[in-house]
Image: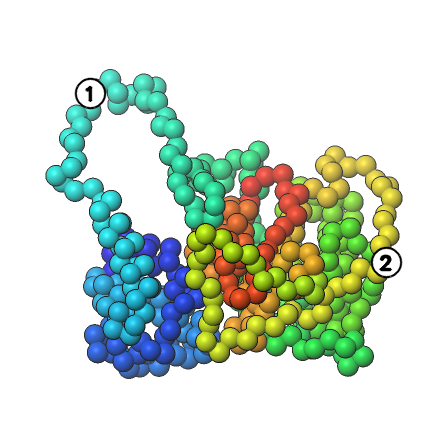
Amino acid sequence: MDEADRRLLRRCRLRLVEELQVDQLWDALLSRELFKPHMIEDIQRAGSGSRRDQARQLITDLETRGSQALPLFISCLEDTGQDMLASFLRTNRQAVQLSKPTLENLTPVVLRPEIRKPEVLRPETPRPVDIGSGGFGDVGAPESLRGNADLAYILSMEPCGHCLIINNVNFCRESGLSTRTGSSIDCEKLQRRFSSLHFMVEVKHDLTAKASHLQFPGAVYGTDGCPVSVERIVNIFNGTSCPSLGGKPKLFFIQACGGDQKDHGFEVASTPPEDVSSGSNPEPDATPFQDDLRTFDQLDAVSSLPTPSDIFVSYSTFPGFVSLRDPKSGSWYVETLDDIFEQWAHSEDLQSLLLRVANAVSVKGIYKQMPGCFNFLRKKLFFKTS
């Protein structure tokens, strides 16, 4: 498969993972000799064996199956009645091919001696390119920003940071909270993802908690049924409480309900296909935190930087609304976060990545979910991917 087809597959990967009906494809893939029987068996055993995990592995393996793999795969989709996906891929592939320069439309350029001198050359204005998340980026901007300490955090150490994952699945009977089936799948994905981004990862399971105050919205529950506010978690790492992390980015990803409301969404002129995955029965993620008592700390320290600086909190859902989790494939938010980071972390900063996550999650399901964030970073953050 040539590089253009690989890029196309990676760009369309999230939609393919969400919509692909893999169980209908096996015979077609074998008949067109795209995969051998033992390869199909390996794909079917991928991850937890869910439809999404199989689809994800199929798309990954497809890149290794020769120059005609993509057109043959599109034919398989047509053979199995998955015409919308087939048309989507075929149209995008044709657009890519039409945009390739050919010898006929290339104009020869003769360089004069004087324009070979660096001082005569003028830098070209970067051309805006669609980054697929409702915004625009500059061509080449990430590389020029990564090494600029005034504009981006420099992650040059190995490991580049520490990642703590708290995975609460089983709650005590007195808490009245149900088991968070599927949370361990989220945990495994996050552990692999942040390890690949050069973080030292530590996982803690089923921790208890003590009640606390909050200023950031929301909280997470310990297995004893007591809430720990996001405010308290964040304050442990702020400039006053933890001076050694001063000036360094602190990232928090919160997968939990923000309330008990279920969002039915609203109609728009053109809506992408909903995620109505077969066998999927998403459930609210545990019990939403109820804000019964709120207190506030007084300011008691002076710092060279604002106390809450360099903090970024990403929430899986809007305050007041449920956060949905599939018992078989994990939460919508973490699954999408993992997919987006895999595809784009090498070239985009954190905020651009999370715009992609928000956009992808927002079009899923019958009930709707809208991730968001509180951003107190002072610079762009690019993950270390190589």
Describe the element under mark 2 as helix, strand or loop. loop
Look at the image and tell me whether residue 197 can be seen: no
Look at the image and tell me whether residue 297 can be seen: yes
Is residue 230 or residue 379 the one in the foreground? 230
Q: Callout 2: few (<14), some (14-19), or many (20+) C-alpha neighbours within 10 Å?
A: few
What separation in Å lies between label 1 and label 2 (alpha carbons)? 74 Å
Is 302 positioned to the left or the right of 76 in the image?
Answer: right
**92 vs 147: above or below:** below
Image coordinates of residue 173 in percent, x first then y, are 77, 81
Q: Quadrant of the N terminus?
A: bottom left
Q: Which coloring applies here?
A: rainbow
Image coordinates of residue 332 in percent, x first then y, are 55, 65
The outermost residue toward the left is 104
The quadrant holding residue 144 is top left
Q: Amino acid at mark 2?
A: Leu
At 80% across and 59% down in the image, what residue appears? 291
Image coordinates of residue 354 in percent, x first then y, are 54, 51
- The reply to whether the C-beta atoms of the residues labelled 1 and 2 are less than 8 Å apart is no
Is 119 positioned to the left or the right of 346 in the image?
Answer: left
At 50% across and 63% down in the image, what residue appears? 364
Q: Callout 1: few (<14), some (14-19), or many (20+) C-alpha neighbours within 10 Å?
A: few
Q: Amino acid at mark 1?
A: Arg
The quadrant holding residue 334 is bottom right
Is residue 250 or residue 48 the one in the foreground? 48
Q: Which residue is mark 1?
A: 112
Label 1 vs 2, first from the N-terminus: 1
Q: Which residue is mark 2?
A: 293
